[in-house]
């Protein structure tokens, strides 16, 4: 198992997703396509082939050993990422195939895969598997980096068409995306001549999500050290710099609220209750007797 490092965890907290390009080897991609995508042109076909997995099933018990999906979730890099974010013993919420036929006329609306979620001490993740090359013409998944800190009702953001800084995620066969369940996203229209397929697996934690990643590179004292707001991150391990980043779709005042939410998420994942970006959250907690 290869757990996530401080730089990867920081990017997840800042952006709400991680992209692992080409993680599945070619033979596993081929086996996945043969099992769940071959001769399908719509969702219904692909979903009918998936094994039935009840809500709450432990991930370790969800798939037969000889099932392609068992091989996928057992990959050391993916298993390590799941463990890093959720901790041990995570359970399956649901899984589904999304298959888009060629020459589509419309895109999916922007949404997040939850109702208004008031949880502060836990979050789910969604693992998206792309078993084939996904080009820009094929659409891929559109995400709004950093939007996971804005808790909205599922389709209440559908009226938004394009936001500054949005990213259309493409990549080679075997690419995996790991999303915070509140991240705003949408499937883009498939304008190519090929069928596009994506498998989604939502997972829930079963215990505290603190300290399950590779913390050997994390220096709490250095991470807490204040630095001027809006100063550029000096490196991927610069926690203060990374988490003070302003995404271009957010105005400066509401971006400060995003920073507070990122601080809360970092505290949850690191266990460092004294961590605060530019003291924003610390000020709110200052209630002298």
Image (cartoon, grey):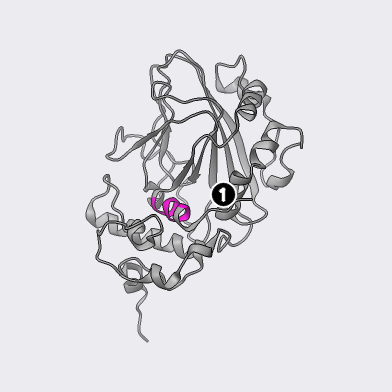
Q: Is residue 57 visible?
A: no
Which residue lies most toward the right here? 65
Q: Tell me the residue that label 1 is attached to.
A: 81
**Left or right side of 200 for 219:** left
* Image-based side of 115 in relation to 35, left or right: left
**Does 82 lie within the magenta span?**
no
Q: Residue at x 50, y 64 (%)?
A: 270
Task: Pinpoint residue 263: horizontal percent, then vertical percent.
Answer: 40, 63
| Label 1: which secondary element | helix
Up-down: is 289 above or below 92? below
Q: Is residue 73 left or right of residue 22?
A: right
Which stretch is magenta?
8-14
Please give the name of the residue rendered at 64% of the width and 27% of the height, measured from the top-left corner.
Answer: 27
* Residue 97 rendering spot, x and y as whole percentages: 58, 29
Pick whichever, 82 or 184, lies toward us: 82
Crowding at mark 1 (Cα within 10 Å: few <14, some 14-19, many 20+): many
> In which image quadrant can residue 278 be found?
bottom left
Magenta highlight: main SS = helix
**Residue at image point 27% right, 48% down:** 250
Q: Could you tell me residue 165's position as x and y percent?
A: 30, 40
Observer able to see residue 160: yes
Q: Nearer the viewer, residue 158 or 207?
A: 207
Position of the C terminus, as image quadrant, is bottom left
Q: Measured along the vertical axis of the image, is residue 123 above or below residue 177? A: below
């Amino acid at each position: 198992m290869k757990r996530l490092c401080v730089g990867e965890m920081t990017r997840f907290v800042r952006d709400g997703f991680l992209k692992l390009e080409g993680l599945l080897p070619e033979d596993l991609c081929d086996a996945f396509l043969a099992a769940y995508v071959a001769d399908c042109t719509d969702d219904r076909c692909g979903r009918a082939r998936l094994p039935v997995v009840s809500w709450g099933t432990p991930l370790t018990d969800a798939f037969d050993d000889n099932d392609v999906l068992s091989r996928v979730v057992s990959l050391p890099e993916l298993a390590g990422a799941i463990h890093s974010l959720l901790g041990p013993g995570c359970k399956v919420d649901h899984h589904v195939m999304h298959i888009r036929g060629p020459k589509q006329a419309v895109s999916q609306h922007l949404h997040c895969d939850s109702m208004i979620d008031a949880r502060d001490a836990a979050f789910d993740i969604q693992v998206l598997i792309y078993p084939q090359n996904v080009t820009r013409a094929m659409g891929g998944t559109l995400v709004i980096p950093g939007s996971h800190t804005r808790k909205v009702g599922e389709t209440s953001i559908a009226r938004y068409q394009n936001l500054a800084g949005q990213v259309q995620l493409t990549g080679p066969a075997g690419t995996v995306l790991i999303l915070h369940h509140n991240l705003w996203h949408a499937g883009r229209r498939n304008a190519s001549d090929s069928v596009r397929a994506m498998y989604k697996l939502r997972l829930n934690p079963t215990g505290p999500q603190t300290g399950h990643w590779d913390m050997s590179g994390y220096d709490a004292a250095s991470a807490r050290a204040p630095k001027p707001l809006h100063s550029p991150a000096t490196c991927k391990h610069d926690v203060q710099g990374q988490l003070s980043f302003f995404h271009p779709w957010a105005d400066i005042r509401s971006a400060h609220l995003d920073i507070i939410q990122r601080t809360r998420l970092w505290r949850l994942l690191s266990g460092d209750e004294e961590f605060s970006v530019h003291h924003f959250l610390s000020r709110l907690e200052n209630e002298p007797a």
